[in-house]
Each structure stands twice: as structure tokens, then as C-alpha cells.
Image (cartoon, grey):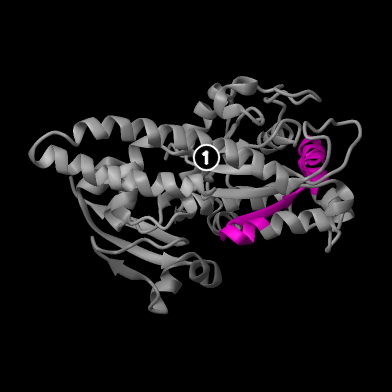
Amino acid sequence: MGLAIGIVGLPNVGKSTLFNALLGQAQAQAANYPFCTIDPNVGVVLVPDVRLVQLAALFHPMKTVPTTLEFVDIAGLVAGASKGEGLGNQFLSHIRQVDAIAHVLRCFADPDVVHVGGKVDPRGDRDVVETELMLKDLEQVEKRREKKAKDAKAPGKPGELAKAEIAVLDLVKADLEKGVPVRMQKLAPEALSILSDLFLLTGKPVLYIANVDEEQLTRADDPTVAVVKALAAEEGARCVVISGKVEAELSELPEAERLEFLHSLGLEEPGLNRLVQAGYELLGLATFFTVGVDECRAWTIHRGMTAPQSAGTIHTDFERGFIKADVQRWEDLVRLRTEAAVKAEGLLRIEGKEYRVQDGDVMHFRFNV
């Protein structure tokens, strides 16, 4: 669906290491010096989904196709980025182009990996990046306000619209000056619509990644991780605890050895699975499935999309000629093993154009063009 999550943070917090692990190969350079990444690296990542695995086990299809998510490895920001420090303007423009932010915060201590701030301080690191994003947003808002102040002098409706926009810009500016990012400002839908073409950096949804070492992974009361969880809770944001180093080692192992390696660390699944799933949820996405002996496939939609809109993700003809959809829940199909059994239990539904597709629906669309 063309949606992307930008991986951001200070230099040397493990962004590129995590990105490489996500892709399972070293596409992003990772090295021990600031600004190692200059141009953003982009990768398409498969979204792990046990539901698709179980559905494919029923049908033994010729092809199984998971859904995907795009991640962008963005160079490290530093204090002063909003004024151009550390190639800041270039990096901030890269953040502007993504739909959500995965903010990597360093929680591990390693004398061999320099920290630009000289110490491990995840809250301080977050504040540096957030401040630079807010300063850039403030600059954008002020520029727009100057333009609209001229437009407000026009007679009639154009002037009225400009004045309404100025009122919204003034509200946003006041909160930014208080240190409140746009995503945490209590803005009405109409106000958000007015701001939409500004692509404000702090208006993007955020999840936090606590990047830890191997020992911290199994330490329930690690104080540094607790700091990241607390700041995420303050925002109502998600926090994912991952060891970039462990994930990188895991990605280099043969598939058959990965589970044994995880179990040796007391883990059940790769941390990257949780990161991808959290990113998927952050973007407000959901999955429906189509199944059969030819193909079992996961499809990405926005939550709340109707059956015709969801059908359109397969082919525009499906949406244009939509008649109705046969819908069953994935867990019912896995439990009962055949569509006929699901139907016999009264669990196969016929839905029309107004139906909102739910995450985990198994769909068969009927259409006529």
C-alpha cells in the first residue's frame, strides 16, 4: 500500500544493525562512527503471520504470499539538526517522507561503540531528537502562517478560510513552543485536515525500540529499559525491546538453527517479529486472507475499509463490479478444516457493500464487470 516506517535515532544507537537484521542481509552499512548512513536505505520486509502459516497447512498451496511492510533506515540526527547540523536538513526531509516513526533508543553500554552524548541516556536521547523535530515543525508552521496572514486580507471566502487556518496554526505553534509534539496535541479532525499538507514531523505516529544487549533481554527489571517503557507509556505509544546484536546474529544463521539459538537465550520468537507487527499496527493496518490450492495470500488494508474497497486491493475490477463477499473467520476455518464444515456450522456469512472487513477475515469476493 506504499506505506513506510522510518527508523530514526541518534548516531550509533543500532538503527542500521536493526535494519540489516530486518532484511536478513547487510544492505545498510553499519559502522562505529556518526553519519555512517547518509542516504536512506529502503527495504521491504515480510510480515510474519502465524495465521497464514496455519491456513497454508490446510490447503498446501502452490504459493504462499505474506503481506509486506516497508522500512527506511534514516541517518542519525544530532542536536542542531533543525538548523542543518550533521546534514540535518537532508535527514529531516527523509523523515518527512515516511508515514510513521520507529525511534531507536540505545539502552546498552559498550565502550567499543561511541555514544555521541558520552553516556547511555535513552530519555535524553529521545528529547534531543524530539526537540529537533519540533523545531523543524515550528519553522514550517511559522512559514505557513506568514503566507496565510497575507491571504487573510482577501475579501470573502478566501480570506475567511485563511483566517480559519491561521487559528489552527496558532494553536499548534503555541503547543510546540511548550514542547508538545503535534501527535499529542488535542486537535479536531478539521484541524488535522488543514495541517495534512504540511507533513509535520511530530504529527507522525511513533513506536519506541529499546535496543539492549543480550544480558538485558532476559532481565525483567532492567532500569534503562524501564525508562523507555515509561516514556512510551506517557504517550500511549508502543515499546518493543530488542537486541540488535542478537537479531543480527540470528539473521545470519540457517533457518533450521534459528529456533535452537532463540531457545538458548530463553526466547520464543525473534524480537523483529514483534517490531514488524507493532509497526503494522502503528500504521492502522489490518490483514484479510484469500485461500485455495493455487495460493494462500495475506492482503493489507487500512482498518475500517469496506468489502468493496478491500476487494480493490486485489484488483480494481473487483471493487468496480463488487456484488457480495463470502466471509469466514480464519480461526473457524483452521478449527473446522474445510469451508464446507464452516458453512455447516453457520459460520460462513454473506456480506454486502457496507461490510467493514475485520482483521483475520478469510474472504471470497463475487463480482461482475
Q: Where in the figure is residue 236, as x and y percent of width and height? A: 57, 61
Residue 349 vs 151, above or below: the answer is: below
* Quadrant assignment for the C terminus: top left
Residue 105 is left or right of residue 80, and the answer is right
At 46% from the left and 37% from the top, the residue drawn is 138
Where residue 32 sits, quadrant-wise, is: top right
Nearest to the observer: residue 25 or residue 200: 200
Q: Main secondary structure of the magenta part?
A: helix
Nearest to the observer: residue 50 or residue 23: 23
Q: Is residue 110 magenta?
A: no
At 15% from the left and 38% from the top, the residue drawn is 159
Nearest to the observer: residue 178 or residue 180: 178
* Quadrant assignment for the N terminus: top left
Residue farthest to the left, as pictured: 156
Residue 280 is left or right of residue 270, and the answer is left
Magenta residues span 231-258
Nearest to the observer: residue 6 or residue 345: 6
